[in-house]
Amino acid sequence: MDVLHEIFAGILVELDDELQPRSIIPEVCDALYAVLRDTYMKLPTSSSEWQEVASTFSTAWNFPNCLGALDGKRFLVINPSNSGSEYFDYKSHNSVIMLALVDADYKFLYVDVGAQGRASDAGVWDRCNHRKYLEENKLKVPGDASLPYSDLQSPYVIVGDDAFPLKTYLMKPYPGKQLTADQRIFNYRLSRARRVSENAFGILAAKFRVFQQPINSKPEFVNKIIFAAVVLHNFLRVNCKAHLPTDRTGLTAMAVDSSP
């Protein structure tokens, strides 16, 4: 309860005293994000913190040296005025894209919000700061480490699907159907770890019903709503786990059903 009191006090400080009714939603979303982001929405800042993320992935999903699951989520929107086909995506919807890195407990470590629906996940990733910082070694990612029960040294990686490029820091499944037994096992293990991001999207959409239909608002307001929902999601994962799904085997259907 003390945590909630501190949060609401912070929100009141952030809100404008002359707040007009028509602007209350974006103003409140801004206040929520400003108050919660430093505590509940931040990347690890040291090698030991990244190793904690990887340790949880290894324990929960049997995939070692994993720093997060990467995926994109499309939030449906009413096509903004004078935007043409900029927001029209490959599923014939109008949408805004959120690219997210998710930890083993369905918390968002990093999000990039606001790309127009016509873009691809790989295109958003190519332009986002997280990729740039990874390639420039600015995130204090640990060096190579031994795999379990082996002397083989392997880099720490994030995991994604076929949409993303294969890198030393980004692992994706083996392509094709003619795979060896070891390759099929690897793809299965990677898929289990990668689905964490889809499950997190499913929890987010189930908890915040605004995402279950097209959002009728300006693009900049849609972005504010998404950022606020993400930090609230992380807050709930940390403080109110009893009120959210925790069954690691029963979330895939939710993620698929709620993912446009």
Image (cartoon, rainbow, N blue to C red):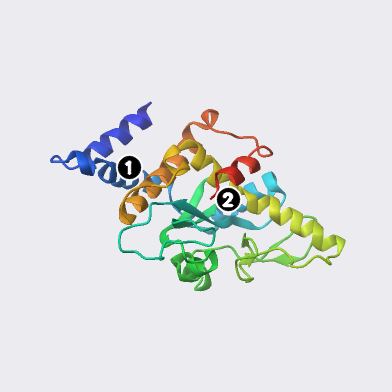
Residue ID for mark 2? 197
The residue closer to the viewer here, 6 or 217, is: 217
Residue ID for mark 1? 32
Above or below, comparing residue 127 to residue 7 in the picture: below
Which mark is on residue 63? none
Q: Report the amino acid beneath label 1.
A: Leu
Above or below, comparing residue 237 to residue 186 in the picture: above
Dot 1 or dot 2: first in sequence order is: 1
Q: Report the amino acid beneath label 2.
A: Ser
**Quadrant occupied by the N terminus:** top left
Query: Within 10 angstroms of label 1, few (less than 14), some, or many (20 or more) residues?
Result: many
Q: Residue drawn 36% across and 53% down?
A: 223
Q: Residue drawn 44% across and 67% down?
A: 129
Q: Residue drawn 46% across and 51% down?
A: 75
Asked which quadrant contains residue 247, the reply is top right
Q: Point out residue 200 in the picture as x, y percentages from the top left corner.
A: 55, 45
- Report the Cα–Cα distance between label 1 and label 2: 23 Å
Q: Secondary structure at mark 2?
A: helix
Q: Point out residue 181 in the picture as x, y percentages from the top left corner.
A: 86, 60
Q: Residue drawn 64% across and 54% down?
A: 194
